[in-house]
Image (tube, rainbow, N blue to C red):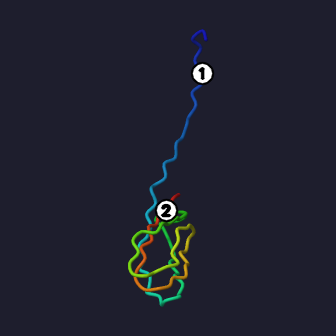
Amino acid sequence: LGGCPSTPVNIVQTVNPNPTVNAVSPTAICDGGTTNIALTSTPSGASFSWTIGTVTGSVTGQTAGSGSTIAQTLTGSGTVTYVVTASL
C-alpha cells in the first residue's frame, strides 16, 4: 500500500540429487531358502521400496515391500525380478 518497499528476504532452495540404486548380484538360493538382498544407494541414505516384476517358473513367496533388505522365503524353481525404487 502506498508504494512502500519491503526489506529483501533471502530464500534458499535446496535441490537433492536423484538417488541411484546400487546394483547387486544376489546368489542363487535353494527351494525354501530366504533371500538376503542388501540395498544401497548413491548418495547413501535413501529409503527403498520394491514391486515384483517378471517371475519365471514356479517361484512363489515373493511380495512387494520396503526396507533396506529384501528378505523373503521363496519356494519352487525359476527367477524373480524385484523392481527397486530409491527415494531421498
Q: Nearer the viewer, mark 2 or mark 1?
A: 2
Residue at image point 60% right, 21% down: 6
- Position of residue 80 relative to residue 19, above or below, is below
Residue 54: % across, % down: 39, 71
Question: Which of the two discs, 2 and 1, labels the residue nearer the N terminus?
Answer: 1
State the residue position of label 1: 6
Residue 5: % across, % down: 57, 18
Residue 50: % across, % down: 49, 66
State the residue position of label 2: 86
| Residue type indicated by callout 2 | Ala
Residue 18: % across, % down: 45, 56
Q: Residues within 10 Å of mark 1 (few under 14, many from 20)?
A: few
The answer to which image quadrant residue 80 occupies is bottom left
Q: Residues within 10 Å of mark 2 (few under 14, many from 20)?
A: many
| Residue type indicated by callout 1 | Ser
Label 1: which secondary element = loop
Q: Is residue 8 left or right of residue 52?
A: right
Q: Is residue 38 left or right of residue 23?
A: right
Residue at image point 38% right, 78% down: 56
